[in-house]
Amino acid sequence: MQPVLAAWLALSLLAGTGAQDMCGEPSTRSVSAPQLSPEERLSPHMPESLRCDACHAIAFQIEEQLRRAEGKVGRKALSESDYVEVLERSCSQGWESYGVQELDGEKRLAGPGLPRQEPMTVMVTGGPWPGRLSKMCHGYVGEQGEAQIYGAHRRGPAALRELLCHGDKGPCAGGKAGGPSPPKALQNEL
């Protein structure tokens, strides 16, 4: 229901702009929702092509939650029990403000902490995206460990993004930000 409502709202706003071309005639623009593949619609996992964007969204949310928690306690460093709780809360949040947009035929994740996208596009939110982001976030915490993630946060946002997204196994390693990584060379190649 939310994706349909978002598309309807965007199209309604576009139709009601009253834009006119140079001759005084009303101009029209067509904006359509991204065409999602079966994997993008149905898989419980984040599609490979969106994992780098998803990682940056997760790093942004973790950074924001930890920064707010440090501000509330009035001291710079959180206790282990505090940062473990904040990380759990970060990963379990709703993630409803994230969705997919299509720009020039390329699908990109959009939402807080990600680069601004084209204003004349439709963003599909809800559906599988919140669950996928939460699952990835919990995976990062389990794989890296709370202490390592908090240590990276203490070194700054770039260190946290590097740890989660750009390391050897990170979803942004070796490729352009947001895009799929190039295929890895086979070990048996000469």
Image (spheres, rainbow, N blue to C red):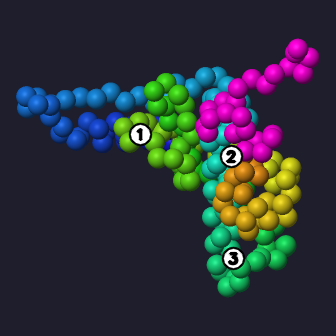
* C-alpha gap between disc 1 and disc 2: 21 Å
Among the two numbered marks 1 and 3 on one chain, the one whose residue lies closer to the N terminus = 3
Question: Is 16 part of what is drawn in magenta?
Answer: no
Residue under the point 49% across and 31% down: 102
Q: Residue furthest left?
A: 23
**Residue 82 horizontal side relative to residue 96, left or right:** right
**Residue 172 horizontal side relative to residue 188, left or right:** left
Q: Secondary structure at mark 3?
A: helix
Highlighted magenta segment, given as a residue range: 166-190
* C-alpha gap between disc 2 and disc 3: 22 Å
Q: From what the image shows, is residue 180 above or below residue 142?
A: above
Residue topped by disc 3? 70
Q: From what the image shows, is residue 117 above or below residue 48?
A: below
* 93 or 155, nearer to the observer: 155
Residue under the point 73% across and 68% down: 154
Which percent across, then down, holds residue 189? Answer: 87, 15
Q: Check if mark 1's residue and mark 3's residue have beta carbons within 8 Å.
A: no
Label ID, residue 55: 2
Main SS class of the magenta portion in the image: loop
Q: Amino acid at mark 3?
A: Glu
Q: From what the image shows, is residue 108 above or below residue 71?
A: above
* C-alpha gap between disc 1 and disc 3: 34 Å
Q: Secondary structure at mark 2?
A: helix
Residue under the point 47% across and 47% down: 116
Q: From what the image shows, is residue 61 above or below residue 116?
A: below
Which percent across, then down, holds residue 98? Answer: 56, 47
